[in-house]
Image (cartoon, helix red, strand yellow):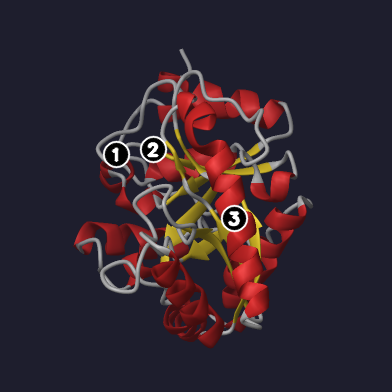
């Protein structure tokens, strides 16, 4: 069984599914791979997006669940969003956290950098019992250049979700190398599809599950593809069996210490 916590299957709200046909194709593809549940995570690029499209997101989510039920597709869809990191970002909306559980939320950084404000911002969320899950950190240039920064975030309670396609090299050699470095150092908590369509950004979790299982064992694969995702949706406490392993530092000063000032 597989649970996908990052997908763009709700149509007409972002750069994911562009119509109902594409949305249903994605869901059917997921079902065929043994995916039993998904979190729909449309982009929220700014606080103003909540006012602009939250109602539409919720309405289309409800319509999607009706269509899935009508076609007897055996898959459960939960609602969340992918929040672009901003200094004024909040979690005060029904779609901010997974299944509105007020605990786990998916957040995206700019691909080209790690903004200076995020360390303190995420630390404040953690103090409030809200747990950030950084989407596809392996694609972020800052993390690619300094993967030891990933350990610093994880060490302080931030969770990491890598994209399945990164393991195949879909986003380039640097993203692939960073993804495997993270896996080697127990710095991955979720593997998800980030599925947008059935062409260039498809859902390929079953294939990647087998790769992870063959390289890291069944227990690790189950944890990343099912156990941890279920815990995040249910809003329960995540327990890591393996401690994160520090990555050799290339800097003298802690990234976290540098950014939180």
Q: CA distance from mark 2 to mark 3?
A: 25 Å
Would you say residue 156 is visible in this rendering? yes
Q: Dot 1, crowdedness within 10 Å: few (<14), some or many (≥20)?
A: some
Q: Which residue is mark 1?
A: 142
Q: Which residue is mark 3?
A: 61
Residue appearing at x 35%, y 67% in the figure: 197
Q: In the image as oriented, which residue stretches furthest toward the top? A: 261
Label 1 with label 3: CB-CB less than 8 Å: no
Residue appearing at x 36%, y 41% in the figure: 249
Q: CA distance from mark 1 to mark 3?
A: 34 Å
Q: State which quadrant residue 131 falls in.
A: top right
Residue appearing at x 66%, y 49% in the figure: 98
Q: CA distance from mark 1 to mark 2?
A: 10 Å
Label 1 with label 2: CB-CB less than 8 Å: yes
Residue 45, percent from left and from top: 41, 34
Q: Quadrant of the N terminus?
A: bottom right
> In the image, is 235 to the left or to the right of 162?
right
Residue 52, percent from left and from top: 48, 30
Name the residue nearer the viewer: 44 or 53. 53
Q: What secondary structure is found at the residue carrying circle 2?
A: loop
Would you say residue 80 is visible in this rendering? no
> In the image, is 69 to the left or to the right of 144?
right
Q: What secondary structure is found at the residue carrying circle 1?
A: helix
> In the image, is 1 to the left or to the right of 209?
right
Residue 204, percent from left and from top: 41, 77
Task: Give the number of the disc on residue 109.
Answer: 2
Q: Earlier in the sequence, mark 1 or mark 3?
A: 3
């Amino acid at each position: 069984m597989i649970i996908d916590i990052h997908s763009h299957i709700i149509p007409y709200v972002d750069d994911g599914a562009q119509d109902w046909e594409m949305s249903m194709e994605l869901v059917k593809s997921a079902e065929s791979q043994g995916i039993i549940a998904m979190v729909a995570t449309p982009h929220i690029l700014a606080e103003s997006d909540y006012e602009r499209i939250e109602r539409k997101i919720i309405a289309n989510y409800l319509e999607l669940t009706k269509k899935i039920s009508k076609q007897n597709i055996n898959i459960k869809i939960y609602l969340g969003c992918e929040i672009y990191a901003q200094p004024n970002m909040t979690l005060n909306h029904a779609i901010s956290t997974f299944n509105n559980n007020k605990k786990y939320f998916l957040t995206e950084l700019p691909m080209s950098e790690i903004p200076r404000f995020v360390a303190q911002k995420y630390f404040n969320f953690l103090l409030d019992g809200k747990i950030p899950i950084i989407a596809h950190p392996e694609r972020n240039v800052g993390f690619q250049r300094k993967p030891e920064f990933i350990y610093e975030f994880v060490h302080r309670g931030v969770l990491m979700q890598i994209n399945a396609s990164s393991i195949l090299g879909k986003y380039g050699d640097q993203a692939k190398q960073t993804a495997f470095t993270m896996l080697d150092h127990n710095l991955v908590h979720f593997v998800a599809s980030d599925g947008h369509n059935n062409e260039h950004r498809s859902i390929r979790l079953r294939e990647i599950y087998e790769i992870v299982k063959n390289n890291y064992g069944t227990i690790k694969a189950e944890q990343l593809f099912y156990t941890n995702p279920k815990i995040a949706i249910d809003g329960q406490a995540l327990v890591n069996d393996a401690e994160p392993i520090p990555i050799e530092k290339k800097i003298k000063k802690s990234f976290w210490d540098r950014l939180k000032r």
